[in-house]
Image (cartoon, rainbow, N blue to C red):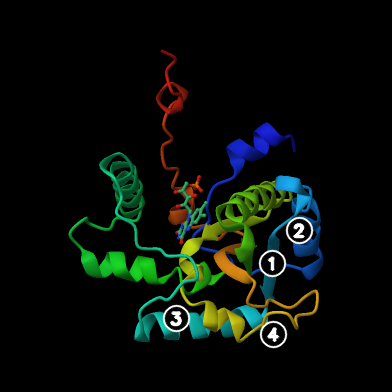
């Protein structure tokens, strides 16, 4: 699949089929994503892969955490959205609820849909993307390039995904499932204190569900370009 087709075809999947995904397919996608550019080629990203039973255990623990305490993400999630961005955010949120037949004022149904985030949308696997804390926003920018490469590779391989910042709400829960050592003593594959959890990615195969037909609008090119003097 060429890049342009992958860009146009990729969309977020919010209900997965139970079909398992092979570790080899995930590795092939990560192998593609390695090609992502980064400043000085530092590749300041790390991925924790939860497939099958590990993903189920994480799903269970994340749902329990979400039901019992406030999020404590490595990167703050509480923003004041300026009107320009808030309008786009609301339009996207309401568009999704409309697709699902959820009324705007039905807060309970909206909360139930939101909670599905912690169930990882029933995906058979999830990836947890970390950025190195030393490079601050540039590590995040580089990790964003990696994320996009990963999403496009998955699309080209007929694998469905949903990037989920919500899955970074409880880093301690994710940590429990992966080797984590304290700073300085880490081996190559450990997630140590140098790494901050940026987001999760649900990954697997899309279920035949109306939620997966949602296509939120994009701003036109004319609107995203700054005008010359
Ligand atoms: C970094 C990032 C974090 C996201 N976090 C969430 C999330 O927590 N939950 C969710 O349902 N969608 C999440 N999304 C998906 C966006 O809502 C989605 O990409 C956007 O609405 C555009 O829709 P599309 O991906 O279907 O083209 C996230 C996307 C990105 C890039």
**Earlier residue among tags 1 and 2:** 2
Residue 30, picture quadrant: bottom right
- Name the secondary structure under disc 2: helix
Residue at 51% x, 85% y: name it: 61
The answer to whether residue 38 is seen in the rendering is: no
The residue that disc 2 covers is 30
The residue that disc 1 covers is 47
Give the distance between the C-alpha atoms of the residues marked 3 and 1, in whole angstroms: 21 Å
**Earlier residue among tags 3 and 2:** 2
**Earlier residue among tags 2 and 4:** 2
The residue that disc 3 covers is 63
Q: Tell whether label 1 touches label 4 (CB within 8 Å).
A: no
Q: Can you tell which of label 2 and label 4 is closer to the viewer?
A: 4
**Earlier residue among tags 4 and 3:** 3
**Earlier residue among tags 4 and 1:** 1
Q: Can you tell which of label 4 and label 1 is closer to the viewer?
A: 4
Q: Residues within 10 Å of mark 3 (few under 14, many from 20)?
A: some
């Amino acid at each position: 699949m060429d890049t342009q087709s992958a860009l146009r075809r990729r969309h977020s999947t919010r209900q997965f089929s139970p079909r398992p995904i092979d570790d080899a397919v995930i590795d092939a996608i990560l192998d593609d994503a390695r090609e992502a550019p980064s400043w000085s080629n530092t590749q300041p990203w790390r991925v924790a892969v939860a497939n099958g039973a590990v993903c189920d255990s994480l799903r269970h623990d994340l749902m329990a955490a979400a039901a019992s305490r406030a999020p404590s993400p490595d990167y703050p999630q509480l923003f004041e959205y300026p009107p320009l961005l808030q309008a786009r955010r609301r339009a996207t949120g309401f568009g999704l609820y409309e697709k699902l037949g959820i009324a705007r004022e039905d807060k309970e149904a909206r909360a139930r849909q939101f909670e599905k985030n912690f169930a990882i949308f029933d995906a058979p696997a999830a990836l947890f993307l970390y950025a190195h804390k030393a490079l601050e926003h540039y590590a995040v920018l580089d990790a964003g390039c990696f994320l996009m490469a990963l999403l496009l590779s998955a699309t080209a391989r007929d694998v469905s995904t949903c990037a989920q910042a919500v899955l970074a709400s409880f880093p301690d829960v994710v940590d429990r499932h992966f080797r984590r050592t304290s700073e300085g003593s880490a081996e190559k594959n450990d997630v140590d204190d140098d790494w901050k959890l940026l987001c999760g990615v649900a990954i697997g195969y899309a279920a035949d569900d109306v939620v997966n037909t949602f296509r939120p609008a994009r701003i036109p090119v004319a609107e995203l370009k700054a005008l010359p003097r």
